[in-house]
Image: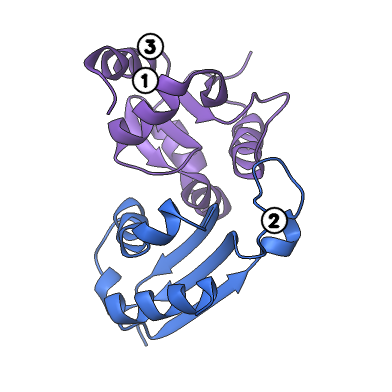
Amino acid sequence: MSDQATNDRIQDYVNKDDVVLFMKGTPIFPQCGFSSVVSQVLDHLQVKFQSYNVLDDMDLRQGIKEFSDWPTIPQLYVKGEFVGGCDIVREMFESGELQQLMTDKNVARAS
Amino acid sequence: MSVEETIREKLTAAFAPSLLEVINESDKHRGHAGSPGTGESHFAVKIEAAAFAGTSRIARQRMVMAALEDELAGPVHALSIKADAPAHD
């Protein structure tokens, strides 16, 4: 079980930045194909995003699954709201919904 | 029973799908970090069922993952899910 401190820390992470990606590895060196896809989609959309590498942090790796009630990684948050994992991100990107969501939520752009 | 057959059986029992494709993609991932090399670790599921009507994407994925909870906790390392309600005709 994850503790309250981890839960609070995750809540801080998703509040602090508009777009937050919990992934395996980093955008430069993703350690998983699914994490890589989501990171590339965000790059393509030119939104500013903060990523957290769950492989560096076992509390986070377990904690984020419980926080979101979602058993897999990657996980994308936009303005504090859980959007989904790789399949959902890919579907929403292909249909144009993800671009629309970023626009509607007025997220910060990549500089 | 193979993992693929188990997935097919459990999803059929849970959702009575009008369309179900279970694809074993394990060979595409052989040898990468975290891949167990069992040949039954990476799957893609395409499913259409009336049970998904009016639900969100997140809800549909959660429903499928819940039906396959034992497999995801066990042999299945990665599962790609495309779940929809049947298209209206």
* Residue sitting nearer the eye, A99 or B32: B32
Residue B61 falls left or right of residue A45: left
Residue A51 at least partly seen: yes
| Quadrant that contains the N terminus of chain A | top left
Residue beneath disc 2: B37
At label 3, the amino acid type is Lys
What label does residue A57 carry, if any? Answer: none
Question: In which image quadrant can residue A48 be found?
Answer: top right
At label 2, the amino acid type is Gly
At label 1, the amino acid type is Val
Residue beneath disc 1: A14
Residue beneath disc 3: A16
Residue A5 falls left or right of residue A30: left
Circle 3 chain? A
| Quadrant that contains the C terminus of chain A | top right
Which element carries disc 2, helix, strand or loop? Answer: loop
Which element carries disc 1, helix, strand or loop? Answer: helix
Residue B40 falls left or right of residue A5: right
